[in-house]
Amino acid sequence: MINQKALLVKLILMCILLLCVSCMTPNRPPMTGNDHQMYGIVEGLFQHRYWNYYERGKSFTDGALTYYFKEPRDLEKAMHYLQIAEADFTEAISSRDKDQFRARTYGMHFLDYFPHRERGIVYYYMADILKQQKHTDAAKEWIIKAMNEMEISLYGKKLTAFLQNNVAPQYSERSEKAIVYLQKIQALRAQLFYPDKAFEFYVWQCNSVPSQKKNPISLWHLHPEQMTYLDEILIQGRIQHHTNIDRIEIRINNKVMFAPIIGKDVHFF
């Protein structure tokens, strides 16, 4: 004879468990992009693992950008789906924080995993949308978040942590996509914070060249009469070279700052 009381208790516990799971994992159904394709999907079964959230977040980002780039544009929808993508990347980071190539998922399966980079890209487009909508103050907040995420992706932590200790930054996990977007973020940041002096970065990808040890090229030196009493100055310039430009180094009062660069013709600030 079935114990009805025990069965009732089990049913109640199962309901509570299902309710808890549904509360912990927000429902983020797939979306239809501006190109009529489905986004917000993953390969196989969604098991609430970090790689599921990462894969779905990238898919939501791709879908959101169809409304950002493709005519007729819909910036409100783009912003909405970017926010959903950001939530997925945040879920992924809460389980596995470090950006890296070949992160282990299960068994002998690996994944190039860059949630901070991808979240930084989301923040970049959110900042640009807010700028286009004339919400400058909000755009400034998001572009700073984008900068922080891209630095964490490249260096493992924000650059200020290196500069405060006068330590040269070392790449934690360098990806070309992160460097290109870092330059885009820097350009948008300049437009927001220095609207009278802002300009775009021009970057051309080129094939790798054999590494050779060469003396650094000194572009200029500031003489004492050129010193400034200002707390902050905007340094900008342009470098062109027939081979690959790897980085820019700026030395002020024996303190060194580095900027990752890719290209043969680069504006920097």
Image (spheres, rainbow, N blue to C red):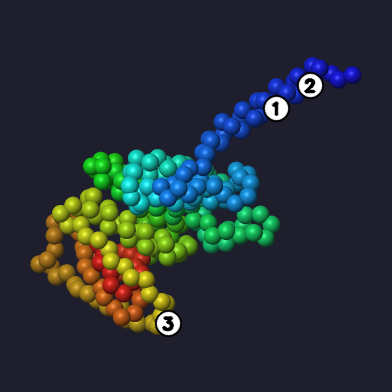
- The percent position of residue 44, horizontal first and vertical second, equals 63, 50
- Which secondary structure, mark 1? helix
Seen at 59% across and 32% down, the residue is 22
- Which secondary structure, mark 2? helix
- Gap in angstroms between the C-alphas marked 3 and 2: 71 Å
Question: Does the CB distance between marks 3 and 1 fall below 8 Å?
Answer: no
- The percent position of residue 259, horizontal first and vertical second, equals 33, 64
> Dot 3 surroundings within 10 Å: few (below 14), some, or many (20 or more)?
few
Residue depth check, mark 3 versus mark 1: number of the one nearer the observer: 1
- Gap in angstroms between the C-alphas marked 2 and 1: 11 Å
Seen at 35% across and 59% down, the residue is 182
* Residue beneath disc 1: 14
Residue 45 in sight? yes
116 to 249, vertically: above or below? above
* Residue beneath disc 3: 210
2 or 1: tag closer to the N-terminus = 2
Amino acid type of the residue that numbered disc 3 sits on in the rendered structure: Pro
Q: Is residue 106 left or right of residue 50?
A: right
- Which secondary structure, mark 3? loop
Q: Is residue 61 left or right of residue 259?
A: right
> Considering depth in this image, is 200 or 259 the residue closer to the camera?
200
> Dot 1 surroundings within 10 Å: few (below 14), some, or many (20 or more)?
few
3 or 2: tag closer to the N-terminus = 2
* Residue beneath disc 2: 7
> Considering depth in this image, is 218 or 145 the residue closer to the camera?
145
Amino acid type of the residue that numbered disc 2 sits on in the rendered structure: Leu
Amino acid type of the residue that numbered disc 1 sits on in the rendered structure: Met
- Seen as rendered, the residue at the extreme right is 1
> Dot 2 surroundings within 10 Å: few (below 14), some, or many (20 or more)?
few
Question: Does the CB distance between marks 2 and 1 fall below 8 Å?
Answer: no
